[in-house]
Amino acid sequence: MTSQVDLPVSRIRVLVTDNLAQKGVDLVRQTPGFEAVVQNKLSPEALKDLCRDADALIVRSASRVTADLLAAAPRLKVVGRAGVGVDNVDVEAATARGVVVMNTPGGNTISAAEHTLSMLMSLAKHIPQATASMKSGKWEKGKFLSVELSGKILGIIGLGRIGSEVARRARGFNMRVLAYDPFISAEAAQALGVELVDLPELYPQADFITLHTPLTPETRNLIAAPTIAQMKDGVRIVNCARGGIVNEADLHAALVSGKVAGAALDVFAQEPTTDSPLFALPNFISTPHLGAASEEAQEAVALEVAQQVIDYLQKGIIRNAINAPSVPLEVLRTLQPYLTLGQKLGRLASQLSEGRLKEIHLGYQGEIASLDCVPLTVATVKGVLDPIHDSVNMVNAMAITKGRGIRVIESKSTEATDFASLVTVTLQTDKGKTETAGTLFSRQDPRVVDIDGFRLEAVLDGYLLIFSNLDVPGVIGRMGTLLGQNNVNIAGMQLGREKRGGRAVSILNVDDPIPAPVLDEIRRMPNIVYAKLVRV
Ligand code: NAD
Ligand code: MLT
């Protein structure tokens, strides 16, 4: 999706923290007009200070992007997270300020899946404990009896990118794989050779359980005393997703009692963790959040995030955004002229309407209805808000309507109209209803074709004088004379009327803004019902 990015006249400054792989920094530096400021291990205050004149911020997991930091960064337009989890970014505060938050979802999937398998194997074969024993000068061949993965049941909670790759690899080890993920279809699971089940079915059957969900209110403390009690005796648990999904105190108790035979954590509720009762247990192994710490993954996420940030600031293209709809480039090419149409129609309707906005109804008819209209809705809502809100953009438009209690309703019909595609914007306020409809001519040029039921056809660009009058001789002539006397050039004119002698609505495309006193004079002219100057 694209949105208007106000490029600063000076160079675009990208602040890079958290030891981003050098290739990402190089990419920013090699891009004309961009500069990268690289500072690692910053205190929160130092980070905030550096953000004051940054246009973009690229972080990994160490830097915390708080509401306070965002408030002190007036130029900031995008936060790029080299990695998946955005728990170190206040996404809500960023959204409210119109700052795009992007992550790089695919770059570290394989590394995280391989790390998970390494943890599973290490748990089954006691590799870390046996290594420590040998390094302490012992040869304890009888102590480390292992189990095989083959023929065992693996329970995967969260069958997304990493969960799916873990499933593929586990199938390679001849494991039977059960998975729980409320957002994955049975067909998708079946294609992976995985049986989709509910948690009450998964817990008592699984020999190994591995977690691959985000940390959400639903998944926080998902693995705790009550759920561990439902598991098979001697289960082994792996968490390479997020700290907090496993309750560490309850896990400790279950490892001590032997209910859980072994556990492997890559992630902890508190990071870094250098001291935990778990470290004293022989059946517990851990790594310091290394799931994505491979050469390949770090390079991939660094390049991905740098390119995404550059694309957004250079061309307005949003990819992998957490808080704005992302659109693949090829879809964007088709949708872009409609986004312009929607935004302009929204601005037009907004400036024509009177009163407190309560509802925005968007109608999509014809060919457009068969496309993904979410970005079009966002663009149109942005257009509606443009004249009434200072800093609305594609990121915060929907959040602003929600915050103000404005309903946004979308309806679609693929049935043909007089136009290949028709977009209708209806605004309901406490004073009444305003409707505008528009289409694209030659698939490019936005035109308004209807205002409050009056059929007309005007170019949607620049300044438009829109007036309603009684359809009697002399009105248009007087209007032309008055504008001419005041040096306002008329670029086009369209008229729609109910019936001869009834009401008419006219649109004059004018090259220049009309001065307020002239507009007042127009409103005082005989037979004029209303007159408004709008800019789209
Ligand atoms: P993903 O979005 O592709 O997959 C997450 C899956 O979890 C989705 O399919 C979703 O439907 C599912 N899910 C959400 N809520 C659920 C619930 N309540 N119960 C069951 N399933 C639920 O994400 P991913 O790229 O596979 O990453 C998974 C996790 O791994 C994330 O938490 C991510 O931050 C973490 N991660 C950790 C490392 C690491 O270094 N240890 C590296 C990469 C990713
Ligand atoms: C992620 O969310 O991508 C991983 O946890 C890796 C990281 O923290 O960088």
Image (cartoon, rainbow, N blue to C red):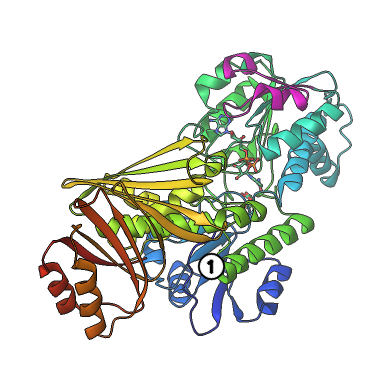
Which image quadrant is residue 363 in? top left
Report the front residue among 337 and 146: 337
Residue stretch rendered in magenta on the structure: 176-202
**Residue 375 image point, x, y percent:** 50, 50
Q: Which residue is drawn at 64% across and 25% down?
A: 185
Residue 98 against residue 375 in the figure, above or below: below
Let me know if residue 432 appears in the view.
yes
**Residue 442 image point, x, y percent:** 57, 58
Instruction: Find ligand 1 in the image and state its quadrant.
Output: top right
Image quarter (top left, top right, bottom left or bottom right) of the N terminus? bottom right
Residue denoted by label 1: 57
Which image quadrant is residue 113 in? top right
Q: What residue type is labelled 1?
A: Leu
**Residue 212 image point, x, y percent:** 64, 36
**Residue 434 image point, x, y percent:** 26, 49
Residue 405 against residue 386 in the figure, above or below: above
